Image (tube, rainbow, N blue to C red):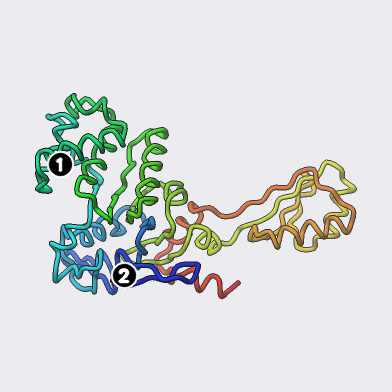
Amino acid sequence: MPTSRQGDGQSSPTAVSAVGLRKSYGERLVLDSIDLHIPAGSVFALLGPNGAGKTTAVKILSTLITADAGDLHVGGHNLAADPQAVRAVIGVTGQFSAVDGLITGEENMLLMADLHHLSKSEGRQVAAELLERFDLAEAAKKPASTCSGGMKRRLDLAMTLVGSPRIIFLDEPTTGLDPRSRHNMWGIIRGLVSDGVTVFLTTQYLDEADELADRIAVLNDGKIVAEGTPEELKRIVPGGHVHLRFTDPAAYRAAVSALNEATRNDEALDLQIPSDGTQRELRVILDHLDAAGIEADELTVHTPDLDDVFFALTDRTDVPRQSAQSTESAR
């Protein structure tokens, strides 16, 4: 199996690898030679606007449709040469629930066990364990159509886990859920990863990617325009600053003199200093204030969030690909 380099310099197996992945529908190029390398036991999030190609990438890597080109490996298996071996190690939870609303939660689980060729006793045991794990005792004995949206999504994911997949594709798994149900799903995903499962996540919720993902790629017009950890991506976008507020006009004037790069708001007695939000830069600002004997009444640090990154990278069509490596080398 291929390996990826982790931040600690150690190699770890690569769960999903795509080199030169291309897909077109007629004259429309949906995926334009994208590369992905996802370490085992991590959460990878693919972000992008509607129509960017996220679901197409999931469908290809989960063997639902074929690629036009690309060297693709999932779970150590070549996708083109051995798709059946890939299917044996993956699970997929799509945008739309696979739950059959006419039968009970338990019957849905047992149906999935039959599809995985489990014996009746093993299927009942696995179903019972997963229903308990996902807090679905209430859904077990009643028609799934009567369950809440959050319960259906948990049941959907529980059904995906019947075959004990080591790689799970979650295509917008929390769309339409209330905040509590979303947070419950996040906890379930973290639990899966702690057990060594790899999660490939697409989502429209940027806070979800920020909370869960070890690495994020931003897909725009069929191309990966940026990739890195959430913190690395946030440093791509300018606009970070330290905001100082004063109530004493004399202290404010002294701070203006001490901090030459600050943007002034004389009426509000506010200063804004460009900063990437690191401890080093914050210490430099505080040292300047301490040396001048100045105390600010309020200090806040603003760093760009993933919303800023998303809008900056997807509002433009001429964005060059940016990576954590190029970002760090520029610093």
Mark nearest the camera among 1 and 2 is 1
Say left or right for 263 vs 218.
Answer: right
User: Looking at the image, is 238 positioned above or below residue 267?
Assistant: below
Choose between 77 and 29: the one closer to the eye. Answer: 77
**Residue 122 numbered tag:** 1
Say left or right for 199 vs 212.
Answer: left
Image coordinates for residue 46, horizontal then vertical, percent: 36, 57
Choose between 75 and 285: the one closer to the eye. Answer: 75
Q: Amino acid at mark 1?
A: Glu
Give the Cα distance between marks 1 and 2.
41 Å
Residue found farthest to the front? 121
The N terminus - image quarter? bottom left
Q: Assess disc 2: are there few (<14), some (14-19) or many (≥20) residues with their C-alpha within 10 Å of its C-alpha.
A: some
Which picture quadrant has residue 216? bottom left
**Residue 34 numbered tag:** 2
Q: Amino acid at mark 2?
A: Ile
The C terminus - image quarter? bottom right
Contact between marks 1 and 2 (CB within 8 A): the answer is no
Image coordinates for residue 165, horizontal then vertical, percent: 24, 53
Q: Is residue 199 visible?
A: no
Image coordinates for residue 157, horizontal then vertical, percent: 26, 42
Say left or right for 311 vs 297.
Answer: left
Which picture quadrant has residue 235? bottom right
User: Looking at the image, is 141 positioned above or below residue 153?
Assistant: above
User: Looking at the image, is 224 positioned above or below residue 245?
Assistant: below
Query: Residue, x 29% and y 73% (percent of image)?
Result: 19
Query: Residue, x 43% and y 65% (percent of image)?
Result: 227
Q: Assess disc 1: are there few (<14), some (14-19) or many (≥20) residues with their C-alpha within 10 Å of its C-alpha.
A: few
Say left or right for 144 vs 196.
Answer: left
